[in-house]
Amino acid sequence: MSLHLDARVAGRGYDVALDVAAGQTLAVLGPNGAGKSTTLDLVAGLLRPDDGRVVLGGRELTGRHAWVAPHDRRVALLAQDPLLFPHLRVLDNVAFGPRSRGAGRRESRDTARRWLDEVGVGDLADRRPGELSGGQGQRVAVARALAAEPSLLLLDEPLAALDVAVAPALRQTLRRVLEGRTAVVVTHDALDALLLADRVVVLDGGRVVEDGPAAEVLSRPRSAFAARVAGLDMVRGTWAGGVRAPSGHVVHGIVTGPAPQPGDPVVAVFRPAAVSVFREAPGGSPRNAFRVVVTDLEPRGDQVRVRAGDLAADVTAYAVAELGLAPGSPVTFSVKASEVAVYGT
C-alpha cells in the first residue's frame, strides 16, 4: 500500500511531505533531532500533528476530521529493542499479532512458525526472550512484526544495537523479507540504505533536504549529512571556475552533469582516501590544499581517519605516527583535482 505524509509539528520545527509507493522501501536519514523519529511517530499514530494528513493505501489515518488509533492502523513498528513479551515463549510472541486480529490459536501458531522459519530462528520457538542473544531477539521481533500482516512496516534503526558480527546476517534477512513490501527504515548506516531501500530521504531541521534513489543520493550527496553517511568529504560554495567556499578558497575538480553558471550553488565531493596529509604545506602550491586542525583520530582497520571538522582523510597508522598527529595538530589536507567531483545542488 502507498503512504502519503504531509504534516507539521510546530513545537519540533517539523514540516515534511513525502510519499512512499506501494511495495517500496524508503530509507530516512538525518542527524539527531532532524525529525526521523517524529516521522515514524506520526505514521504509527503515536503523535498527532498540529496540521496535516497521513494516508495509507487511500485510507486517511490522520487528518482534519480523521484519527485512527495506533492498533487499528495495520502499521508495525520495529525498534532497536525487540520489546518481546518476557513471559511468553518465542512462538507465542510471534503468534500475538494474528491472535489480536481474531485468528484461532492453531492458525496463529502456524503463522508464527512459518515466519520464524522465514527469518531463520524456527528452532527457538520454545525459548523465552531472556534466553535469546541480541541478534536472535531482533529476528524474532521481525517475525512478530510480519506475522501481524501489516500494510506498512516501520523500522527504527533495527541493526544499531547489534554486534558487527551479527548485523550482516540480519541485514540480509531484512533485505529478503522487505522485497515487495511498503516500508520506512530510519538508519544512520549507508549500507542499510543501499541494501534495504529503493529510495532515500534526508531530513535536516525538520525539512526534506534530499530525496532520490538510494544509490544516487549516496554517490552524489547534496547535503553535508548524506556526504558524511556515504563516507565522503564535501565542500559547499558557488561556481567561480571551481567551488568557491565561504572562506574564499576555490576547490577545483571535474564537473559532472550540467555545466554550472557563475554564482550557481555547487558542491565539491571527494573520498577521504584521496586526501594526503602534510605537516607543512607541500611544495608546488597544489590547487586543492586546505590548512586545517585535526579534531579527531578514528581507527578503521589498518587505516586511521583523520578528521578536521567537516573534512576527513584516511591514512595509515604509520603515517599518523610519523607525522605525530593528534587532536589540535595543524596540518594541510591536499587532494588532486582529478579526484574531486563537482556538481550543482
Image (tube, rainbow, N blue to C red):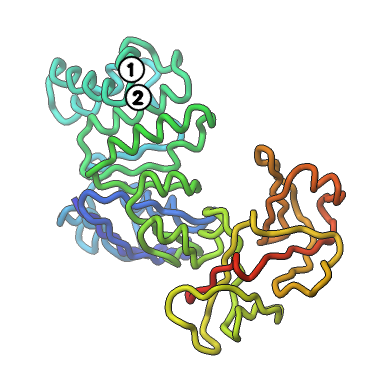
10 Å crowding of disc 1: few (<14), some (14-19), many (20+): many
User: How far across and down, in percent of the image, does residue 70 sit?
Assistant: 27, 43
Frontmost residue, 34 versus 231: 231
Residue tagged by mark 2?
A: 140
Relative placement, left or right, of 140 versus 248 is: left
State the residue at coordinates (31%, 51%): 43
Secondary structure under badge 2?
Answer: helix
Frontmost residue, 248 versus 250: 250
Distance of label 1 from label 2 (alpha carbons) = 7 Å
Quarter where residue 312 is shown: bottom right
State the residue at coordinates (29%, 60%): 5
State the residue at coordinates (33%, 22%): 120
Q: Would you place residue 255 above or below residue 234 in this image?
A: below
Secondary structure under badge 1?
Answer: helix
Frontmost residue, 49 versus 188: 188
Amino acid tagged 2: Val
Tell me, yes or no, whether the two marked residues, 1 and 2, touch with CB atoms within 8 Å: yes
Residue tagged by mark 1?
A: 90
Quarter where residue 97 is shown: top left
User: How far across and down, in percent of the image, does residue 186 sit?
Assistant: 42, 48
From this viewpoint, is residue 11 visible?
no
